[in-house]
Image: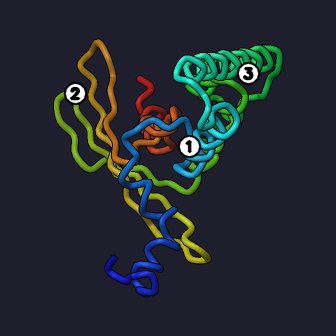
Amino acid sequence: MYKLENNEWLLGLFDERERWVPAFVKDIFWAGMSSTQRSEVLNSFFNDYINSKTTLKQSVEQYENTLAKRVEKENEVDSSSLNSYIPCFTQYELEEQFQRAYTLAKFKEVQNELVGMIYCNLNLSKAGDGFSEYEVREDVLCGKNKKRVIFKVCFKDNGFSREVNYNCRLFESRGILCKHCIMVFSGKRD
């Protein structure tokens, strides 16, 4: 409509979308799937089970069958995880809790976060009654260059519970605790 197909700036934004789009969806849990994967899953479902001659009743039945198959696959993965073991990298009790709670694939993601902690530096920026704010400085690889990125982690301890609030939102989007929060929790072992 606006004849922007060849606009260099917009084409550049589109080519780099993997780098900026996640910032707008980081508060939404996607189980680690990208928007492309979500579209592919939906397209696969519709292409495999629904066509122009499929009735509404058949569509609902196919959807239920697909969900049942998906639950069965998840149960198989859970069973496989219960019968397999990946050793912990660290001596943190937190890692052992993740090892017991997550499937093998999710636990490997947690371990990647633990390994990523070596690129981070924890600094206390504010402290108050039951409240601490930290800056976690992380060296992030952008192409071939390293860039220092600062993440904020707020830690609250009211005596009954501990809570963190942070800006990378990895738990909300992928279901695992980020290296930034793990650093704060591991530093708060008292």
Q: Earlier in the sequence, mark 1 or mark 3?
A: 1
Q: What residue sits right under mark 1 in the picture?
A: 38
Residue at image x 55%, y 48%? Answer: 34
Q: Residue furthest front?
A: 53
- Residue 132 screen position, x and y as percent: 26, 38
The answer to which quarter of the image holds residue 83 is top right
Q: Which mark is residue 73?
A: 3
Which kind of residue does numbered mark 1 sit on? Arg
Measured Cα–Cα span from mark 1 to mark 3: 18 Å
Residue at image x 17%, y 29%? Answer: 129
Note whether residue 124 is visible: yes
Q: What residue sits right under mark 2 in the picture?
A: 130
Element marked by disc 3: helix
Residue at image x 67%, y 31%? Answer: 49
Decide: is 146 above or below 54: below
Decide: is 88 above or below 168: above
Measured Cα–Cα span from mark 1 to mark 2: 41 Å
Measured Cα–Cα span from mark 2 to mark 3: 44 Å
